[in-house]
Image (spheres, grey):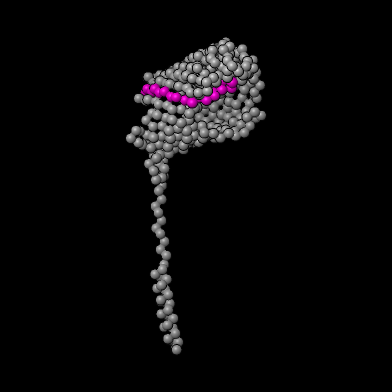
Amino acid sequence: MTIKSLLLGSAAALAVVSGAQAADAIVAAEPEAVEYVRVCDAYGTGYFYIPGTETCLKIEGYVRFQVDFDFGDEDGTEDWSALTRGQVQFTAKSDTEYGPLTGVIVYQANHRGGSDTTGTDFSLDTAYIDIAGLRVGKLFNWWDDDFSGEFDVTNSGYTSFNSIRYQYESGDFYAGIAVEELGDSGLNAEFGTIDALGGTTYQEHGNNVGVDAAVGGTVGGFTYQLIGGYDFDAEEGAIRARITADVGPGTFGLAGVWSSGPSAYYLNGEWAIAAQYAVKATDKFTITPGVQYTANIDPDVSGTGVAGDYVGGGWDGGHEWRAGVTLDYQIVDNFSAKVAATYVNRDSDIVGNDVDGVEGFFRLQRAF
């Protein structure tokens, strides 16, 4: 075989192999188009569409550092303690034939030092579903909507419950009613040494049910709110009225509370009146002084039953004065400082429940 024949044969073989490889060549798939996050402006700023859906989502929250102080009290608490908190909120909204369908989830983590409250807790702060005025879940009730100042005590301190609530809104008017699972709202926590009088607790029937109602709105430069709650377990109720009005360089607020006895809605006394005046000194600085007087702060334990259970009987003597000032300063966008100091003078017939001192806090908060 000649060299020429060998070359021709090799060339033919290479052509066959190359043709086979070309037939079996791998073709790369076209890349899929990326679906970028779209802004949703139907419900305000901060919402975006969850990719592949028509549901709008907003993520927000804050980081807080706070130093609480308490001087001059007779209850033996430490003079100061620090709190660090992180909170994140998810709000989802979508349109339906009944109006917007809303879901809210709020998680909160708190860390404290000190001898009595060391550690970190992580909890579900809020979670509810809302549609056409109906709201169900763990939520804050109307009693949580109190003064902007930090001096007053116009609720029990227990304002978040599993609830079924309906609220009607029309322009500048709203009205609503709610059924709430109250649980043990802590009469003993408020009047700790009352145990010395017989292990007193307001729990009697254990049904843990409360009914809460509210009406409110705006008329001209005034805002008003009237709320009431009845605790079926304690067989006690409370009502609160509040008005605010623009007066001069600030906003004046006046509130009054009446309670038939200690309940999940109000624990501080039989009746109280509070007033504040929030002055916006500059665009970034607000000064809010306020004062509150509460009469008959001691629960009447003369009607206690078996094992010292509180069965009703209202209030029995004592009073409390509170006077304080709150300073709010917006350092930059989404970063603020708050200082609150309140003088408290409580004259009680319950051993260890007297107070004559100053309490308050300093707070830095970064919102996002």
Which percent across, then down, holds residue 168? 37, 25
x%, y% of residue 142?
Answer: 46, 23
Q: Name the residue rendered at 64%, 23% in the picture.
A: 77
Please check the rendered image and state whether residue 204 is part of the magenta-colored stretch, yes or no. Answer: no
Residue 176 located within the stretch drawn in magenta? yes
Query: Is residue 114 visible from the viewing direction of this image?
Result: yes
User: How far across and how far down the image is residue 294, in percent?
Assistant: 54, 14
Seen at 51% across and 32% down, the residue is: 125
Which residue appears at 50% of the width and 36% of the height?
Answer: 88
Tell me: residue 351, above or below residue 17.
above
**In this rendering, does residue 298 appear at all?**
no
Q: The N terminus is located in which quarter?
A: bottom left
Vertical relation: 216 (above or below) 124: above
The residue at the point 60 percent across, 13 percent down is 348
Q: Residue furthest left?
A: 97
Segment tinted magenta in the rendering: 171-189
Near-viewer residue (19 or 213) = 213
Q: Is residue 181 left or right of residue 77?
A: left
